[in-house]
Image (cartoon, rainbow, N blue to C red):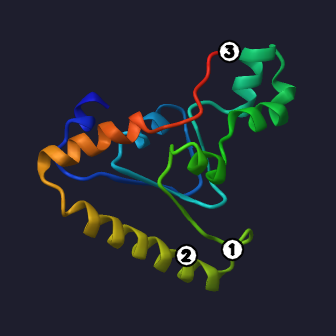
Amino acid sequence: MFEMAKLKVPIIAIVIGEGSSGGALAIGVANKVLMMENGVYSILSPEGYSSILWKDSSKFKEAAEKMRLTAKDLYDLKVIDKIIKEPLEVTEEDFDKITKNIRKEITSEIKALKQLNENEIVENRYEKFRKIEGFKQI
């Protein structure tokens, strides 16, 4: 991830279902993180979190609420940059529409990031982390 953070090319990541564990950390290094509306993104599962916090994995629902791992929560915290709308249940017809939406968002982000020089691209990544909200000491 240290090497990835220093890349002088734009990085766009999209959470299409579940971004978790060490992969979630790597996704966060991107200049732009997009997320499907019904996806989840966290470095730890709710079961793992509740096992650590309360020594009881059955409290995973309470843990999931505290973790704020939904697209809306993460957008509000500025962890992700954009939510890509999707239906709750996906049909074959919806799939085509969803992929077109994803393509449109990628194209838009590439166009914006192409305006930056190499140093600005790296600085953009750094500044993205500086703007993440919601941290507090427990």
Q: Earlier in the sequence, mark 3 or mark 1?
A: 1
User: Dot 2: what SS?
Assistant: helix
Q: Position of residue 134 (x, y in %)?
A: 59, 33
Three-letter amino acid code at the position of disc 1: Val
- Label 2 with label 1: CB-CB less than 8 Å: yes
Question: Relative to residue 25, is residue 35 drawn left or right?
Answer: right
Instruction: Report the Cα–Cα distance between label 3 and label 1.
Output: 39 Å
Q: Is residue 2 above or below residue 61?
A: above
Circle 1 Cα neighbour tier, 10 Å, few/some/many (<14 / 14–19 / ≥20): few
Q: Earlier in the sequence, mark 3 or mark 2?
A: 2
Circle 3 Cα neighbour tier, 10 Å, few/some/many (<14 / 14–19 / ≥20): few
The quadrant in which the N terminus is found is top left
Three-letter amino acid code at the position of disc 2: Ile
Three-letter amino acid code at the position of disc 3: Ile
Q: Which quadrant of the view contains residue 87?
A: bottom right
Toward the viewer: 36 or 122?
122
Question: Relative to residue 5, is residue 129 drawn left or right?
Answer: right
Instruction: Report the Cα–Cα distance between label 3 and label 2.
Output: 39 Å
Instruction: Report the Cα–Cα distance between label 2 and label 1.
Output: 9 Å
Q: Which residue is mark 2?
A: 98
Q: Which quadrant of the view contains residue 62?
A: top right
Q: Which mark is residue 90?
A: 1
Q: Is residue 15 above or below residue 43?
A: below
Residue positioned 72% across, 16% down in the render: 52
Residue positioned 26% across, 69% down in the render: 111
Comparing labels 3 and 1, the label whose residue is closer to the camera: 3
User: Dot 3: what SS?
Assistant: loop
Q: Which residue is mark 3?
A: 138
Q: Position of residue 91 (x, y in %)?
A: 68, 79
